[in-house]
């Protein structure tokens, strides 16, 4: 079973600033980390590899700074890491990033399963995995909480819904995004960290992937009209009463008034 995990390096969310005058989101030049949701995808890829054999690799779109996130994955036991890096990719929207990753997957060649975190914590678009599946004409299931089985070119997964979950049967190869309930990511070993430092990261440019500037970078199909910081969280309210039952009744009335229930 050959597995490819789509990963992204993201900034520390607390350090992101919004410049409303310039209509831009200012990303910090400081620390960057592996997207937390992608950690669950990598862990699931490693677990499936350990059960079925084969390889588990990671691929990302970014710059030289992205290498640190890829080495974090290598330290966990990932076999190989691929970095799609080119000035033409800078500023690409989710559809553009999906085009790059789809081209990278074609270059990797044979794979049985593509895994990704449900979304990146910086953009929160949750578009890339499904867009990759669409570009490669692959079956897809998003927000998966459990792999019940995976064997013989088939997989059965539990897809999270607002009311519980759906059971979905997939024909492989397929693209699956996962939620954090699926597992508990492992920590890297010292041996893994040392090996990751020596491992070569394969780098591909736009030319290597056969991509032009169409739909990428400043030519992305998505245009930003305005940016603004999220509104401040409304001030909370402490309910008081003569008894716990009185407080519970007031809470119930508040929830009904606000159409929560």
Image (cartoon, helix red, strand yellow):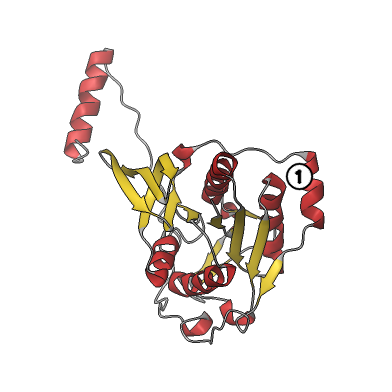
- Image coords of residue 133 (percent x, y): 40, 65
- Image coords of residue 77 (percent x, y): 68, 46
Q: Is 193 on the left or on the right of 99, as rendered?
A: right
Q: Residue at x 68, y 45 (%)?
A: 76
Question: Compared with residue 134, is residue 164 higher up or lower down, i.e. above or below?
Answer: above
- Image coords of residue 98 (percent x, y): 47, 70
Is 29 or 208 nearer to us in this picture?
Answer: 208
Is 259 or 85 nearer to us in this picture?
Answer: 85
Is 22 or 4 nearer to us in this picture?
Answer: 4
Q: Residue at x 38, y 64 (%)?
A: 138
Q: Is 193 on the left or on the right of 150, as rendered?
A: right
- Image coords of residue 154 (percent x, y): 39, 49
Q: Residue at x 26, y 20 (%)?
A: 247
- What residue does disc 1 label? 192
Residue 31 seen from this side:
no
Q: Quadrant of the C terminus?
A: top left
Q: Residue furthest front?
A: 152
Residue 70 seen from this side:
yes
Which structural element holds mark 1? Answer: helix
Q: Residue at x 46, y 82 (%)?
A: 215
Question: Compared with residue 254, is residue 6 higher up or lower down, i.e. above or below?
Answer: below
Question: Compared with residue 59, is residue 40 higher up or lower down, i.e. above or below?
Answer: above
Q: Residue furthest top?
A: 243
The residue carrying pointer 1 sits among few (fewer than 14), some (14 to 19) or many (20 or more) residues within 10 Å by Cα, namely some
Q: Is 72 on the left or on the right of 119, as rendered?
A: right
In this rendering, the count of numbered labels is 1
């Amino acid at each position: 079973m050959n597995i490819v995990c789509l990963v992204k390096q993201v900034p520390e969310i607390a350090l992101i600033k919004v410049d409303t005058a310039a209509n831009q989101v200012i990303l910090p030049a400081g620390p960057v980390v592996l997207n937390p949701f992608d950690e669950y995808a990598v862990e699931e890829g490693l677990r499936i590899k350990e059960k079925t054999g084969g390889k588990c690799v990671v691929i990302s779109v970014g710059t030289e700074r992205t290498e640190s996130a890829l080495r974090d994955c290598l330290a966990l036991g990932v076999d190989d890491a691929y970095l799609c890096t080119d000035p033409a990719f800078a500023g690409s929207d989710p559809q553009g990033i999906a085009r790059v990753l789809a081209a990278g997957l074609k270059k990797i060649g044979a794979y049985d399963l593509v895994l990704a975190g449900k979304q990146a914590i910086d953009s929160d678009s949750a578009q890339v995995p499904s867009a990759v599946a669409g570009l490669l004409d692959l079956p897809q299931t998003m927000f998966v909480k459990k792999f019940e089985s995976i064997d013989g070119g088939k997989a059965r997964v539990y897809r999270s819904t607002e009311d519980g979950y759906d059971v979905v049967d997939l024909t492989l190869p397929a693209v699956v995004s996962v939620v954090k309930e699926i597992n508990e990511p492992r920590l890297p070993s010292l041996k893994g960290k040392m090996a990751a430092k020596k491992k070569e990261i394969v780098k591909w440019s736009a030319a290597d992937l056969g991509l032009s500037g169409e739909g990428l970078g400043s030519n992305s199909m998505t245009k930003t009209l305005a940016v603004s910081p999220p509104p401040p969280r409304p001030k909370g309210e402490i309910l008081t009463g003569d008894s716990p039952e009185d407080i519970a009744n007031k809470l119930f009335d508040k929830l009904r008034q606000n159409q929560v229930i």
